Image (cartoon, rainbow, N blue to C red):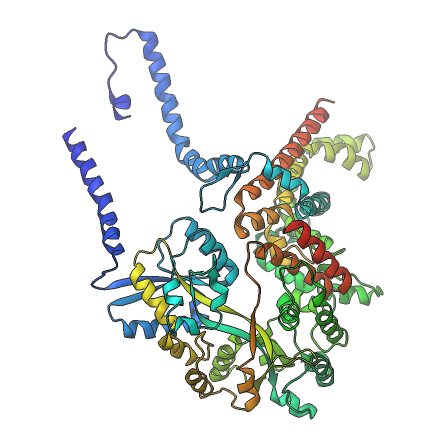
């Protein structure tokens, strides 16, 4: 009996020890080496994480970063499960604002409003997307991607066409048709529209001022007609084929199967890395996204990526330090150096960005990099993910011509009203 | 526990209690044998199933405390168009998948149940799709079904069919494409079950039938089919359950699309629960799915029993 009592006592002490250690971390005055855990996706193919972590560890020698690597496709589900299970990973990367809104709404993230309202914080592009409950912030963006038009110079030269500058959508469609040629293995498309719904829907919402959360979706009409016109003329790989073959936009562009490609700025870092490796010799540059006729200025859409501090973080103080660092000038410099677009886009950083080896230096590219307006890809609300599903499903039906544009839009309006209100 | 097993029985105890004690001990030993399995089953299956049952009457986002809402989730189920479509699609899939797989598997088994050269190779070849990764199967078949450049449609063009279907890009043909793929994948497995059943039928029955002058078809109808009834019953049950919980093939091949043409119940459960975080509603749908499979299986049992008696 005595032995048992002793054992029980020992067990209780052992169980209490880590608790005590946790408690001492909470007062913020940490000393000694700290191991900071950060959730990331596809660490190997997402070089920005390594760049940021290296820079941060160099500036804070007492903190080592231990990434928690998660497969990109599983990232939202995995993080949801982790947070629900009370996981204590310190920093959680917010892959998109829809998931962010959900975590913040459930009270799973620490309030970082003071950082957002600091001098540097206020300058961040895309910060508005993280505003919650009026005026509170639970994450700070460190990168802000937006959409531009990539083009292959050699394919333009071969067709004897001038490089695109400020296209309207009609000019863009004509250009795509004119650049299409060849057959079989040598077929070259004028442009490539990836299968994401944003290629049509987010563009039209941003440029017409339409609201993707409804209830009126008539503003999709023109953009769908434009996209379907290009597809019917054979000037882009058709939606059905791209979907069934799981075609990659990068391989379409890098193997010069398409002359143009509307895509996000995240692709810049990727194509620069591929060129350095020698896996593509595409001579590329960027132009502003085409605009509606008569539009003033360049309007595009984009979405920010952010870091947040887990409410159950083991090292909350160090985590906050990291979030601030990543969104600040030092973090911005570190990721701009590898071609990633930071949320803090000052003139100094923009200049250094275009000084990178392999970056196009023409004026149009620079202009494309300073759009007049970046609209958030998808507005955040508690209905967002439901509406997102509806928009995705109907997008597929319109693009495969299972439904006409008008019937598709009518169906979206009906479903959003019935299923997400 | 230790006391119970090692303590020597008191000498004064009369014999009948001793016997009960021994029986009690045997029962305990028996339990200890199944305990590891039962523990795993309880922790990983039984408790979650009961939790889902309770959750279907609650609102729960996996983080905050669940809230009792009574029948709200089931009411919502009745109004939810996507769930209704998913239910219809699941039934469509089962109605296509079950009979076609049975026919294909039985046909293969009959074909490969004779003494021909290389029969082992052909049996292995027919079984091969079943051990192939479902993701690989779905991706490759999706490419085969490509309406423009896929071999399936090229073949259809070759034999003179001009308006070949759009398969996974068409709302009408996506489900048949999925069914064909799943039949191709599953038939090898059920062929093995049928082969085992065929080999269990005594050859004397065939000889007797031959003596009576029964032709091939009559022997198949009156000897083979009745002899296979236990196996056919098992296959039908397994296939029905499998059809109703189809998930991986559809997620990779069409992801429920185009539109909602191939959205099935288990996918709807995943979307509502894991993606949307509405675990209560997802549990309600899974409860309906469970009830559905239960009723179907019981009906099959009832049919089988009635047949056996007649």
Residue B1's x, y, as percent? Answer: 29, 25
Task: Judge whether B94 appears above or below A184 on screen.
Answer: above
Quarter of the image where the N terminus of chain A is located: top left
Q: Residue at x 24, y 49 (%)?
A: A18
Q: Is residue B174 visible?
A: no
Task: Judge whether A149 appears above or below B192 on screen.
Answer: below
Q: Quadrant of residue A59?
A: bottom left
Task: Judge whether A284 appears above or below B126 on screen.
Answer: below
Residue A254's x, y, as percent? Answer: 58, 80
Q: Residue at x 51, y 62 (%)?
A: A97
B106 lies left or right of A41: right
Farthest left residue? A2
A165 lies left or right of A319: right
Q: Residue at x 65, y 53 (%)?
A: B122
- Foreground of the two, A10 or A101: A101
Residue B30's x, y, as percent? Answer: 40, 26
- Foreground of the two, A122 or B50: A122
- Foreground of the two, A290 or B164: A290
Q: Is residue B282 visible?
A: yes
């Amino acid at each position: 009996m005595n032995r048992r009592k002793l054992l029980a006592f020992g067990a209780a002490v052992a169980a209490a020890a880590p608790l005590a250690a946790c408690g001492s971390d909470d007062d913020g005055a940490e000393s000694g080496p700290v191991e900071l855990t950060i959730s990331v996706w596809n660490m190997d193919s997402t070089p920005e994480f390594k760049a940021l972590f290296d820079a941060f560890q160099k500036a804070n020698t007492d903190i080592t970063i231990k990434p928690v690597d998660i497969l990109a496709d599983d990232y939202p589900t995995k993080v949801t499960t982790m947070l629900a299970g009370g996981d204590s990973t310190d920093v959680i990367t917010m892959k998109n604002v829809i998931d962010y809104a959900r975590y913040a709404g459930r009270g799973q993230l620490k309030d970082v409003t003071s950082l957002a309202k600091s001098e540097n914080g206020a300058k961040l592009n895309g910060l508005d997307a993280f505003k919650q409950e009026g005026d509170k912030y639970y994450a700070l963006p460190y990168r802000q991607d937006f959409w531009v038009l990539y083009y292959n110079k050699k394919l333009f030269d071969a067709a004897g066409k001038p490089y695109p500058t400020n296209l309207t959508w009609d000019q863009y469609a004509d250009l795509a048709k004119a650049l299409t040629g060849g057959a079989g293995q040598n077929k070259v498309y004028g442009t490539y529209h990836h299968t994401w719904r944003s290629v049509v829907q987010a563009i039209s919402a941003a440029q017409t001022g339409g609201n993707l959360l409804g209830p009126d979706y008539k503003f999709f009409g023109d953009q769908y007609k434009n996209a379907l016109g290009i597809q019917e003329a054979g000037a882009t790989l058709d939606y059905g084929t791209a979907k069934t073959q799981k075609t990659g936009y990068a391989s379409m562009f890098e193997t010069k199967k398409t002359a143009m490609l509307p895509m996000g700025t995240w692709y810049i870092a990727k194509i620069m890395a591929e060129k350095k490796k020698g896996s593509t010799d595409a001579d590329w540059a960027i132009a502003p996204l085409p605009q509606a006729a008569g539009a003033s200025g360049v309007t595009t859409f984009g979405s920010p990526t952010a870091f947040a501090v887990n409410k159950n973080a083991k090292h909350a103080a160090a985590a906050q330090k990291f979030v601030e660092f990543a969104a600040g000038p030092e973090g911005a410099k570190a990721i701009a150096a590898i071609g990633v677009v930071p949320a803090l886009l000052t003139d100094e950083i923009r200049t250094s960005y275009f000084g990178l080896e392999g970056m196009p230096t023409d004026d149009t590219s620079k202009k494309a990099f300073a759009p007049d307006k970046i609209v958030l890809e998808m507005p955040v609300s508690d209905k967002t993910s439901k509406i997102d599903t509806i928009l995705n499903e109907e997008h597929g039906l319109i693009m495969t011509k299972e439904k006409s544009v008008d019937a598709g839009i009518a169906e979206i309006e009906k479903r959003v009203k019935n299923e997400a209100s | 526990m230790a006391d119970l097993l090692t303590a020597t029985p008191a000498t004064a105890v009369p014999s009948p209690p001793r016997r009960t004690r021994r029986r009690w001990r045997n029962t305990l030993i028996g339990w200890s044998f199944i305990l590891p399995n039962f523990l795993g089953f309880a922790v990983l299956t039984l408790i979650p199933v009961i939790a889902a049952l309770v959750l279907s009457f609650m609102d729960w986002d996996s983080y905050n405390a669940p809230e009792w809402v009574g029948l709200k989730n089931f009411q919502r189920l009745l109004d939810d168009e996507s769930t209704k479509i998913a239910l219809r699609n699941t039934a469509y899939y089962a109605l296509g998948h079950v009979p076609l797989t049975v026919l294909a598997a039985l046909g293969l088994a009959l074909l490969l149940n004779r003494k021909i050269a290389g029969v082992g190779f052909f049996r292995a070849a027919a079984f091969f799709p079943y051990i192939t990764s479902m993701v690989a199967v779905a991706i490759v078949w999706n490419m085969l079904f490509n309406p423009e450049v896929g071999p399936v449609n090229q073949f259809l063009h070759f034999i003179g069919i001009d308006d070949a279907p759009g398969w996974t890009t068409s709302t009408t043909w996506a489900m048949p494409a999925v069914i064909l793929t799943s039949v191709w994948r599953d038939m090898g497995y059920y062929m093995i079950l049928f082969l085992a059943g065929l080999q269990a039928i005594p050859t004397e029955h065939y000889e007797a039938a031959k003596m009576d002058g029964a032709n091939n078809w009559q022997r198949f109808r009156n000897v083979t089919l009745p002899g296979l009834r236990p196996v056919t019953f098992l296959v039908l049950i397994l296939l029905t359950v499998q059809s109703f919980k189809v998930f991986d093939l559809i997620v990779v091949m069409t992801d429920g699309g185009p539109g909602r043409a191939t959205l099935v119940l288990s996918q709807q459960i995943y979307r509502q629960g894991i993606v949307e975080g509405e675990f209560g509603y997802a549990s309600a749908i899974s409860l309906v799915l469970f009830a559905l499979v239960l009723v179907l299986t019981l009906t099959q049992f009832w049919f089988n029993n009635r047949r056996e008696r007649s």
